[in-house]
Image (cartoon, rainbow, N blue to C red):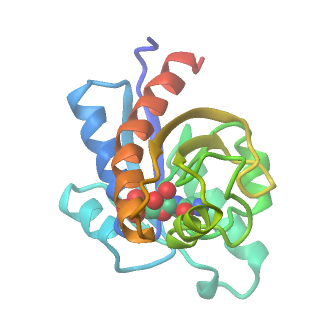
Amino acid sequence: MNDKKKRLAVFCSGTGSNFKALFHAIIERALPAEIVLCLSNRSQCGAMDFAREYEIESLHLSETQFRTYDEFASAMLQALRERRIDLIMLAGYLRKIPDAVIAAYPEKIVNIHPSLLPQFGGHGMYGMRVHEAVIASGETRSGATVHFVNEEYDKGRIIKQNHVPVLPDDTPETLAERVLLCEHRLYPAALEKLLDEQP
Ligand code: GAR
């Protein structure tokens, strides 16, 4: 394993339970990584509260703060460059990453998605909508996928997947709970794999 610590930015929009799972795993497993930034499109959310509590820099960055989308993308790039970010982990970040940022960080942006991609991914497929679609389809298996981010929603190379059963009496909510627990194991394991492989 590479000993030099990678500088991580975690992007969130909500509760941030995956962010918390990553944070704790880095400490408990002594992974060569440090979360130096929590970036969110929302000034107030569980993830930002957690960042403040643990004295991780929290940055509220939203398109609404800028005149144009290009200015927003430039500000995001600048924030990442200034902090010398090596890896960006999307943890429930429900906005598209600007193409300019994706181009600047090829195979350095990672996302976790609550289904077995390539199934139930793509534009508009996030959060509870994914679990509703899985149940409506009659699938007996679901799970979570960690993958690299490219210009197409949920289409980047898959890093790791884990599956869970879909039970006959599941509701989207009960399935979401089971998948989220699976995510909390999967995301740290995927980070560990990435850190092993990174130059
Ligand atoms: C997670 O289930 C994550 O997979 C999903 O949002 C939830 C965030 O939970 N992400 C997507 O749907 C992205 N397409 P968290 O804020 O508690 O980590």
Looking at the image, the residue that sits furthest to the top is 1
Task: Indicate left or right for 118 with 160 as reference.
Answer: right
Res. 92 visible in picture = no
Residue in front for this viewpoint, 68 or 161:
161
**Residue 164: horizontal and vertical position, in percent?**
44, 43
* For residue 56, above or below residue 67: above
- Residue visible at 68% across and 66% down in the picture: 96
Q: State the image quarter where residue 109 is shown.
A: top right
Residue at left 41%, top 26%? 5
Q: Kindly tell me whether residue 118 is visible in this rendering.
A: yes
Q: Is residue 53 above or below residue 193?
A: below
Of the pair 98 and 96, the residue shown nearer to us: 96
Image x and y of residue 177, in percent: 34, 59
In the rendered image, the quadrant that contains the N terminus is top left
How many dots with numbers?
A: 0
What is the residue that sits farthest to the front in this orientation? 168
- Where is residue 87 shown, x and y percent of the image? 55, 40
Question: Which residue corresponds to the image point at 65% horizontal and 67% vertical from the top-left?
Answer: 125
Of residue 113 and residue 37, the one placed in the foreground of this image is: 113
Q: Would you say 34 lies left or right of 40 here? A: left
Q: Quadrant of the C terminus?
A: top right
Residue at horizontal 49 percent and vertical 39 percent from the top = 163
User: Residue 146, percent across and down?
Assistant: 56, 41
